[in-house]
Amino acid sequence: MQALAGSDDGKNMTRFHPYRKISCLLVMLSCMSIGYAQDAARKILKKVPVQYPLVLKTKGIGGTVRLKVFIKPDGSVRDTAVLGGSAILAESAQKSVSQWKFSPSSSETAMEISVLFDPSAKPEN
């Protein structure tokens, strides 16, 4: 970054001090981390177990589904978006996570959740 200190001919140009660049970067990063801290503050109060598609489980097919969950201020789930994973497993994960309940907040938030489908895992009771 450069700042003009006078004329337009480019002869009288000064550079920002390196510490100024670093301090600007630190301010930007701290703002980003504040946004993520809000997301992390939402605790899961009620989890509905994910239904593992029987056909996939018996064939030993598993994987991880990554979802972005949009949570309303009252803690209910407004929407989910698939970020990665098998389409069939993602459908099952979305159906379950959309019924989860989170701690209340003053505003709507979004957070990423990973749902693991492990064919060798014992079923949850």
Image (spheres, rainbow, N blue to C red):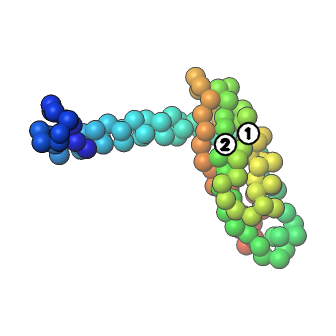
What is the three-letter code of the residue carrying label 2?
Val
Quadrant location of the N terminus in the rendered image: top left
Q: Position of residue 121 (x, y in %)?
A: 72, 68
Answer with left or right where residue 5 lies relative to residue 60. Answer: left
Nearer to me, 18 or 44: 18
Q: Nearest the camera: 61 or 5?
A: 5
Q: Mark 2 = which residue? A: 69
**For the residue marked with disc 1, what is the amino acid?**
Asp
- Residue 47: percent from left, percent from top: 72, 44
Q: Secondary structure at mark 2?
A: strand
Who's the residue at 76% across and 53% down the image? 93
Label placed on residue 49: none
Identify the residue at the far front of this view.
9
For label 1, the SS is strand
Residue at image coords 63%, 50%: 113
Residues under numbered marks 2 and 1 in contact, where contact means CB atoms less than 8 Å apart? yes
Q: In which quadrant of the rendered image does the C terminus lie?
A: bottom right
